[in-house]
Image (cartoon, rainbow, N blue to C red):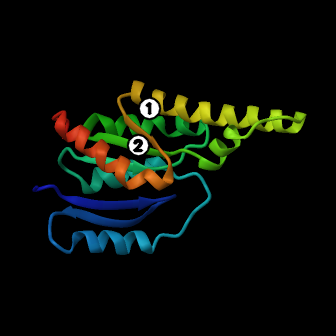
């Protein structure tokens, strides 16, 4: 009750900015903004997000950042901006499990190629967990979720943060 929702999408520059509001049409505006998004395959510039948040948010807010760091190195490049955001806001990074990689892990490995493939899959899964832990160590809440569980896991994390009085 009384919560406001807004949206900032970005890649190399802010693409959609919908100021936070609790009006009845707000969710429709957010859905339309998300629908218009084009998938970009380059690494997003979190300095762009930081600048947009500084310009558009004056009060402490929960920032849910949906992103997909594929490596610890990619996360480290953006970590300074996430830490700056976390000084003023409650930051939750939602990162995605690669369910195809997890399916590879479940397969028995019999040939040399399958053993190598399974080893690489295990390394990729482990790296996602390292990313989650490093974000948390740096004061950034992190949720590692399968895409099919995104909605329910994000809502549950939001409710957890709210029940702990962090929001």
Residue at position x 35%, y 51% in the image = 152
Residue at position x 20%, y 35% in the image = 166
> SS class of the residue under badge 2?
strand
Disc number placed over residue 104 in the picture, else none? none
Disc number placed over residue 93 in the picture, else none? 2
Q: Quadrant of residue 30?
A: bottom left
Residue 154 x, y percent position in the rendering: 35, 49
* The furthest residue to the right: 112
Does any portion of residue 159 appear in the rendered image?
yes
Q: Quadrant of residue 122?
A: top right
> SS class of the residue under badge 1?
helix
Q: CA distance from mark 2 to mark 1?
A: 8 Å
Q: Is residue 108 left or right of residue 112?
A: left
Residue at position x 20%, y 44% in the image = 60
Q: Is residue 4 left or right of residue 81?
A: left
- In the picture, the quarter occupied by the C terminus is top left
Badge 2 local density, few (<14 within 10 Å), some, or many (20+)? many
Disc number placed over residue 135 in the picture, else none? 1
Residue 88 x, y percent position in the rendering: 25, 38
């Amino acid at each position: 009750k009384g919560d406001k929702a807004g949206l900032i999408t970005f890649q190399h520059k802010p693409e959609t900015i919908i100021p936070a509001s609790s009006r009845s049409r707000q969710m429709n505006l957010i859905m339309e903004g998300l629908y218009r998004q084009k998938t970009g395959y380059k690494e997003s510039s979190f300095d762009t997000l930081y600048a947009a948040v500084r310009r558009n948010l004056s009060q402490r807010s929960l920032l849910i950042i949906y992103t997909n760091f594929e490596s610890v190195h990619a996360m480290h490049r953006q970590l300074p901006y996430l830490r700056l955001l976390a000084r003023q806001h409650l930051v939750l990074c939602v990162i995605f499990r690669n369910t195809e990689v997890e399916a590879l892990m479940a397969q028995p490995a019999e040939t040399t190629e399958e053993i190598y493939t399974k080893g690489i899959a295990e390394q990729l899964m482990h790296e996602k967990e390292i990313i989650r832990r490093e974000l948390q160590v740096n004061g950034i809440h992190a949720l590692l979720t399968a895409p099919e569980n995104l909605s329910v896991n994000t809502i549950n994390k939001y409710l957890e943060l709210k029940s702990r009085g962090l929001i």
